[in-house]
Amino acid sequence: MIGKIPMVRLTLLDLRATLRERKTWLAAAMMIYAVLSIPVLLANPPEHVREAIGAWFSDDDPFALFMFVWIDLVMNKAVAFIPVILAAGVVLRERDTGVLAILAAKPITMSRYFVIRTLSAIGVMLTLYVGTQLLGLLWFPSRIPGFRAGDFLAAMSLHAFAAAFATAFAATLIVAVGRRGAGALLALVVLGILVGMALVGFYQPAWYTWTLANPLTLGALSMRALGHLGPGVLLPPMLALSVITALTIAVGARVARRVEA
Amino acid sequence: MTSDAIAVHHLGKRYGAVQAVDDLSFTVEAGEIFGFMGHNGAGKTTTLRMLLGLTRPTSGRASVLGHDVAAATLEVRRVAGYLPAAYALPPDMSAREFLRYVAAMFSIPAATAEARVEALLRRFGLVDAADRKLRGFSTGMTQKVGLAQALINEPRVLFLDEPTSGLDPLGRHELLEHLRELARDHGVTVVFSSHILSDVETLCRRVAVLHHARLIASGEVTALKAEHGATTMDDLYLALVRRPHP
C-alpha cells in the first residue's frame, strides 16, 4: 500500500537495488564477522580491563563489559566505517559513472534525488544493523555470561539511531566536498573523531555534559543505565538523533543542488 | 497550419571565457523529426541540456511545449524524453528494474508503469535479457535500454544526442525505424542531434546546423541543398561550414 506513494516507491526500488550491490555484501560480511568473533575475543578479558569498565560505568557485571565492547569497540567502529562505504555512492557515483546524465533529466530535483538516495542508504545501513543485532541475539546468549536479551535490544535500538545519523552525515559531507574519494576520507576522519570521543564523558565525568553534543555519544547513552533501560532513558536521545539526522539530510539536500550531471 | 513544439530565441551559454552556444534561434514543429547537426563541440549537447534545464542559459530563452526551460524545468522534463550522448546504466540493476526505477521518477502509477515497462521490453526485443544485470549488456542493448527509458513517460518531445554512435548497421537501422514510427504513429516531436550526416538525411526533413557555437543554417534539407548547389548531405555540410562566417 505504502509503495503506491510515488516517492516512497522510488526509495524502495532504490533500497532494493542497493541491498544487492557488492558493497552491501562486503558490509554485511564485516558485521557477521563482528558477531561471530566478539564472544571469542571476550572469552577471557584481563582483570584490569574488567576493573576499568566497572569504574567507568559503575557496573562490574560481565554483561556491562560485553555491552561496552559491543557498543564502543564494535558497533561504533561499524557506524564510522560502513556508512562511508554506503554513502560514498550517493549522487556522486551516479555523476561520475554517467548514470546521472540520464536520471538528472527526469522530473525530480537534485535535492529530492539526494534525499531519496540518502534514505535508501540509511535503509540499507539499518537493514544490516538490525540483521546484525538479531544474529547476535541468537549467538550471544550461549556465549556471553549474564547476557540480557531485553537490555541488549533496547540499547541497540538507541544506537541504531546513531547509525542512521552517521549515514546521513557521510552522505552530506561527501556531496558537500564534491569528490567521492576526498569526501569519503573526510567523512571517515570526522566520524572517527566523533566515535573516538563518544564515551569520553564516561571516562571523564566532568566532560559529560559537553559530550552530549556528539551524536554518537547520544547513541551510546544506554551505557549509563544498562540495568533500567526504559522509554525515559531511550526516547529523548532517539528524538534528538532523529532531529539531527533530519537536519543533516536537509543540509545535504541543499548542497546537492549544485551537483551537475 | 503547424504549431511549434520547441521555440528557441537568442539562446546563449558561456562557461567562463568559452562561448559554448551563441545567439541560437530556431523552432521545431510538433510531430517532426528535426535534425541538429554540427561537429563535435559545436554546441549541440549544450543546447539540448539547456532545453532540458540541465544547465541554465546565460542569455536568451527557450520553451518546450510552451514551458519555459529555465522557469518550468520540471514541467519540461515531465513531457520530454532524453537520451544523452554519453551515459551509463546502473550496472547492478536489470533492464526491467531500471525501467521501473525511471518510471517511479515520473511518479507513474505502479500498474501503468509495469505495463509500459513490459511493452518497451517487447518493443526493443529485450524480454529475454530483461532480468540480467545491465553490466553485461552490449553497446546495442545498452542503447535500446537507453531509448526505452527515454520513452517510459510516453514523451511528446524526444531529445536524442548522437543516438546512433557506436551502433552496428542493423542496430542503427532499427533505431531509425523506431524514431520514424514514433513521429508518424504517435506524433512525437524528435530532436535528433548527430554528426552522422547520412542518419540526419535519412530521418529529417528540416535541420539546424551549428558551427563553433553558432547557428549557420536552418531549414528544409532539400531547400538548403538547392540553395548551396549540393547534391549530398556531405556536400551541403561542407559548403555550409566552409563559407565565411561573420
Image (cartoon, coloured by chain):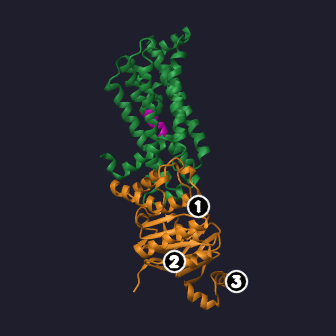
Task: Give the SS element for disc 2.
Answer: strand
Q: Main secondary structure of the magenta part?
A: helix
Q: Chain of mark 1?
A: B
Image side of residue A13 versus residue B134, left or right = left
| In front of the other: A153 or B238 | B238
Mark 2 sits on what residue? Answer: B34
- Kindly identify which numbered label has been placed on residue A232: none
| In front of the other: B212 or A15 | A15
**Whole-Å distance between the Cαs marked 2 and 3?**
23 Å
- Kindly identify which numbered label has been placed on residue B86: 1
What quarter of the picture does the C terminus of chain B occupy? Answer: bottom right
Q: Are marks 2 and 3 in contact (CB under 8 Å)?
A: no
Image location (x, y in percent) of residue A232: 32, 26
Mark 3 or mark 1, which is nearer the start of the sequence? 1
| Residue under the point 53% across and 16% down | A40
| In front of the other: A183 or B38 | B38
Image side of residue A102 versus residue A5, left or right = right
Q: Badge 3: few (under 14), some or many (20 or more) residues near its Cα, within 10 Å?
A: few
Q: Amino acid at mark 2?
A: Phe
Image location (x, y in percent) of residue A241: 41, 35
Q: Chain of mark 3?
A: B
Q: Badge 2: few (under 14), some or many (20 or more) residues near its Cα, within 10 Å?
A: many
Q: Quadrant of residue B120?
A: bottom left
Q: Amino acid at mark 3?
A: Arg
Task: State the hue of chain A.
Answer: green
**Whole-Å distance between the Cαs marked 1 and 3?**
29 Å
**Whole-Å distance between the Cαs marked 2 and 1?**
20 Å
Residue A166 colored in magenta in the image: yes
**Which span is picked out in magenta?**
A161-168
> Of all residues shown, which one is farthest toward the left?
A1
